[in-house]
Image: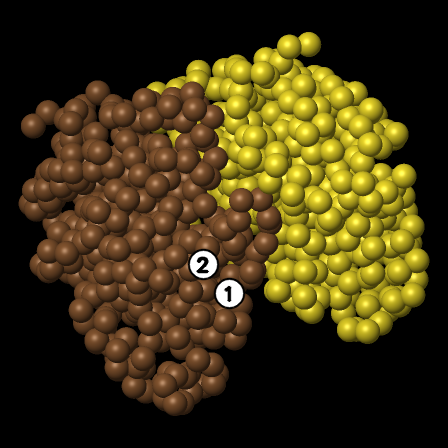
Chain colours: A yellow, B brown
Amino acid sequence: MQHLKAPLGKESILKAIRSCLPADRKNIELHEPYFCGNEWKYVKECLDTNWVSSVGKFVDLFEQKLAEYTGVKRAFAVVNGTAALHISLKMAGVETGDEVLVPDLTFVATANAVTYCGAFPHFVDCEPVSLGVDAKALDKYLAEMTEMRGSVCCNRDTGRAIKVLIVMHTFGHPSDLDALQAVCDRYKILLIEDAAEALGSFYKNRHVGHWGKFSILSFNGNKTLTTGGGGAILTDDEDLGLRAKHIATTAKLPHPFLFFHDQIGYNYRMPNINAALGVAQMENMAFFLEQKRKLAMRYKKAFSGLSGIRFVDEPSYAKSNFWLNAILLDRGVAQERDALLDYLRNDGIRARPAWTLMHKLPMFADCPRMEVPVAEDIEARLINIPSSPFLINEATS
Amino acid sequence: MQHLKAPLGKESILKAIRSCLPADRKNIELHEPYFCGNEWKYVKECLDTNWVSSVGKFVDLFEQKLAEYTGVKRAFAVVNGTAALHISLKMAGVETGDEVLVPDLTFVATANAVTYCGAFPHFVDCEPVSLGVDAKALDKYLAEMTEMRGSVCCNRDTGRAIKVLIVMHTFGHPSDLDALQAVCDRYKILLIEDAAEALGSFYKNRHVGHWGKFSILSFNGNKTLTTGGGGAILTDDEDLGLRAKHIATTAKLPHPFLFFHDQIGYNYRMPNINAALGVAQMENMAFFLEQKRKLAMRYKKAFSGLSGIRFVDEPSYAKSNFWLNAILLDRGVAQERDALLDYLRNDGIRARPAWTLMHKLPMFADCPRMEVPVAEDIEARLINIPSSPFLINEATS
């Protein structure tokens, strides 16, 4: 069936998608914020008290709520997920001329952040269940192409140190963290979780973010929880966490009035007004997740009878936040992906494909990489469909 | 009189400061936001329309208002002034191993941004009127220590290219831009204006920001106008401006659904909710400036009869925004600076000294620099005093 050449049933797919969505909405974005709690109240409090900038109670409160919810020891709110990745890589000791293993299938920020350290992204393949880094393929690849020099894993070809693996929980589905951690341990590589899309996602009943020495979140406007723009660094290492906060806030030493900075720092702290939104959104996190799961299950059911496509479900070991719902076209009809996207978008459904693979972008074309047959396959066949938490609320059941 | 060793009249200074400030306020911060316009209305509109993130009408509107007000062709709103400097330096062609001339007396962000490009800050002295870069001293220094290699000015000692001079309008007082531009022209060095503190400041009747190929603003919580956290890039070169915007927004090529990025980019765009604050604040910009000028003139008058200190006035060629009012202790009593700071702060006046000079910070200790006697002198003697625009409003006249 998979190589069937029959034309894709675009009408049936559109009908299936529409059957899950509110009938009275013509244009439906991929993911929109849902402000149904104390957003107004807290933001107004910032304005009324003059505390809008990077010092203020909502920043502390938001960080506290993030740490509690995810179970990590320390959470630090920053301006966005990219900044969180940059600081995490710095803290992990990534330096000019190093290499960092990065999934080929990811948003460009993951690879960009590596270059901010003067390092080179080194792209690896994903596996077809979680769409995250393939631990087995990575293990085999590292055995072939690296050698240990003392306690440092080095690329045999380039001679560069490979210090870090960033895994990314694609569309909110957790990567296979235990397996990936085992590979990292074997090669003495430090793990960082890019959980930009995965707030509210659990791996084997524990929230993601504990496997990486550092993990990062994003609260961009298209995420499950938004602060306008924002991100966070999570860590279970209190000392490293405090040092991360220090360099994210211009590395200024505490003093009542003297300005003394003890190292190169960054201006990455989240403003209080954005954190106020975050605190209000956190209060509704359980509700958002419930709504998003309902929508995902409705999609799953609606697509179950259709030929030519399948719904991308959560891995068996995980409870996903279903950040962005996705469907995969069968290989035989993959060439119709763009026609289907046009068809859906013409009807008002803002569907989109996966990101262009990192190694196909001009600035990363010469970066080292393994063969990426699965990433290529997923890129060719995947489509994201609307996933806002309020959509299910309004739909007829 | 200047070398008089008589003890500083701390009580008279406190009394003079207090005479300019509201009698019913015990604790007075250095600079606080003033939300007295449409801030809540516009922020609420963001929440009501779901447009909180980096796309939205307030970002466009804020940029339009900034361009109109300053008179530049293009203004782009970003997450903060540091990000604006980073992008400006990138656009100016600063690369790994270059040198950038930076005032020794500045906030650390000016020098940090240079290092983000892999370049080295090269510190220069200021002059005592504007507290900005001393054009004459710089000219003499460059004549001695540089040589032209083709059209590139190079440091004779290090062999590195010196591509850019960043000038910083200290506490809002414009540097002597014509003189500095002439030096830059002579050595084929590109000028960037760090106007983080200078929105609302005019040099020879024209708003600052037109002399630099790029100029930057900051809207941090302590600035004349705040967006919580934020900054902007200003330029009169439309083409360079659009390219700056492109790399500040992940360098994504416009396409209805494809994610294709044509170069290393950054995640630096200002969220819409922060821009909403900015639009409201811009509507009151003239009022803020009027209030701040009134306060400055009141301070000037109050200090005019005191010995041991003088008020730092705007340069004769300029109309300053008086972002942070400052007093200079006479040299003979400079050693009492910290005692005066403690005395004022114990009374609730959040005074502070100037920043530690850049060459005294450990990460910049080995950077090239000229002798900086004026910066050393200013650092030892300067104190900033409360400057919020609402203070005058409440004070008895």
Q: Secondary structure at mark 1?
A: loop
- Position of the N terminus of chain B, as image quadrant, is bottom left
- For the question of whether residue A128 can be seen, the reply is no
Q: Is residue B59 left or right of residue B12?
A: right
Q: Secondary structure at mark 2?
A: helix
Residue A192 versus residue A335: which sits nearer the camera? A335
> Hey, which quadrant is residue B396 in on the image?
top left
- Position of the C terminus of chain B, as image quadrant, is top left
Percent position of residue A303, x then y: 77, 26
Sort mark 2 into few (<14), some (14-19) or many (20+) by Cα contacts within 10 Å.
Answer: many
Q: Is residue A321 above or below residue B335?
A: above
> Hey, which quadrant is residue A117 in on the image?
bottom right
| Disc number placed over residue A141 in the picture, else none | none
Q: Is residue A161 above or below residue A349?
A: below
The residue carrying mark 2 is: B86
Percent position of residue A140, x then y: 93, 58
Q: Is residue A394 left or right of residue B144?
A: right
Question: Disc 2 sits on a residue from what chain?
Answer: B
The residue carrying mark 1 is: B117
> Hey, which quadrant is residue A68 in on the image?
top right
Percent position of residue B254, x then y: 50, 51
Q: Residue at x 76, y 46 (%)?
A: A334
Please report whichever mark, 1 or 2, sits nearer to the chain's N-terminal start: 2
